[in-house]
Image (cartoon, rainbow, N blue to C red):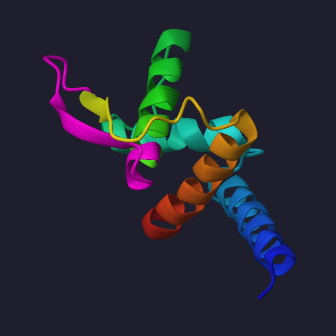
Amino acid sequence: MNETEIMENKDNSWEELLLKVSKKFNVLADFDFLLFLIGIQERGTGYIKYSKDEKMDLINLARCVLFERKGFYKQDGCDEAGWPIFSVVNVIDDIPPSERERILKQAMVEYLDEKL
């Protein structure tokens, strides 16, 4: 496979994942919805009504979990409220935002392929 074929395959995997999740949850799934869904899965709270701040916390949790899977973070236990605590293993701030999004998309495809 050349680089173009690899990129097209990754794009197809992403589109297939969006379609699969959209059908399963009867929503129009997008990047943020998938992060929210992963955050709910990782927190183990189930799908209940969340405040805006709680939604942002769940999305942030998902980002941390996904970056952990890619070797950027490491979980160091949990805080008193049961939220995971992560430390930086490899600095991601120097990576351009478009590349960070690509890394997250790839990690989401892998994560949700395992869970769905």
Of 26 and 28, which appears nearest the observer?
Answer: 28
Counting labels gives 0
Who's the residue at 80% across and 75% down the image?
3
Residue 29 at x, y = what percent? 72, 46
**Residue at the (25%, 39%) spot, across then down:** 75
Asked whether 32 or 106 is in front, the reply is: 106
Q: Is residue 48 left or right of residue 83?
A: right
Residue 15: image x %, image y %?
Answer: 78, 62
Q: Which residue of the protein is positioned furthest toward the bottom in this rendering?
A: 1
- Is 81 rendered above or below residue 35? above
Q: Is residue 99 left or right of residue 69?
A: right
The answer to which of 114 and 26 lies nearer the viewer is 114
In this rendering, would 106 be left or right of 50?
Answer: right
Report the span colored magenta: 67-83
Vertical arrangement, residue 22 with respect to residue 54, above or below: below
Would you identify the image quadrant in which residue 54 lies? top left
- Residue at left 28%, top 42%? 74
| Residue 70 lies in the magenta stretch | yes
Among the 4 quarters of the image, the one containing residue 94: top right
In the image, residue 112 lies in the stretch drawn in magenta: no
Residue for point 41% across, 44% down: 72
Horizontal side of residue 98 vs 51, given as left or right:
right
Quadrant where the N terminus lies?
bottom right
Q: Position of residue 88 (x, y in %)?
A: 35, 33
The x and y percentages for residue 65 are 40, 43
Q: Residue furthest front?
A: 94
